[in-house]
Amino acid sequence: MRLTVVTYNVRGFRDGVDRLAAVVERLAPDDLLLQETGPR
């Protein structure tokens, strides 16, 4: 069994949600850990 885990520092989404969505879609992780999401 293979498990894909991705951690992504979104820096408060300064690059926009679209960029994050593109990366997540491309990598298709089983688990996604987001860092520095801010107060939103």
Image (spheres, grey):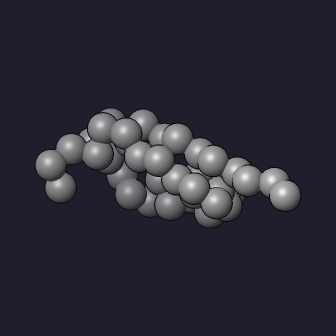
Vertical position of residue 22 compared to residue 35: above or below:
below
Q: How many labels does the image show?
A: 0
Q: Nearer the viewer, residue 20 or 1?
A: 1
Question: Residue 11 appears in which quarter of the rendering?
Answer: top left
The residue that appears at 44% across and 60% down in the rendered structure is 18
Left or right relative to 40: residue 33? right
The residue furthest front is: 1
Instruction: Tell me the residue at 18%/55% (across/down).
Output: 40
Q: Nearer the viewer, residue 37 or 19?
A: 37
Answer whether residue 5 is visible to the viewer in this image. Answer: yes
In the rendered view, does 30 fall on the left or right side of 35?
right
Q: Which residue is drawn at 15% across and 49% down?
A: 39
Please report the residue visible at 47 percent of the width from the left and 53 percent of the height from the top. Answer: 20
Residue occupying the far left of the picture: 39
Horizontally, residue 22 falls left or right of residue 26, namely left
Q: In this view, does 5 lie to the left or right of 38?
A: right
The spot of residue 36 in percent (x, y) is: 30, 38
Placement of 37 over or under 2, stated as above or below: above
Given residues 35 and 13, the one toward you in this image is 35
Which image quarter is the N terminus in?
Answer: bottom right
Q: Where is residue 30 in the image (x, y as percent from the top left)?
A: 64, 60
Q: Position of residue 6 (x, y in %)?
A: 59, 45
Q: Can residue 19 be spotted in the picture?
A: no
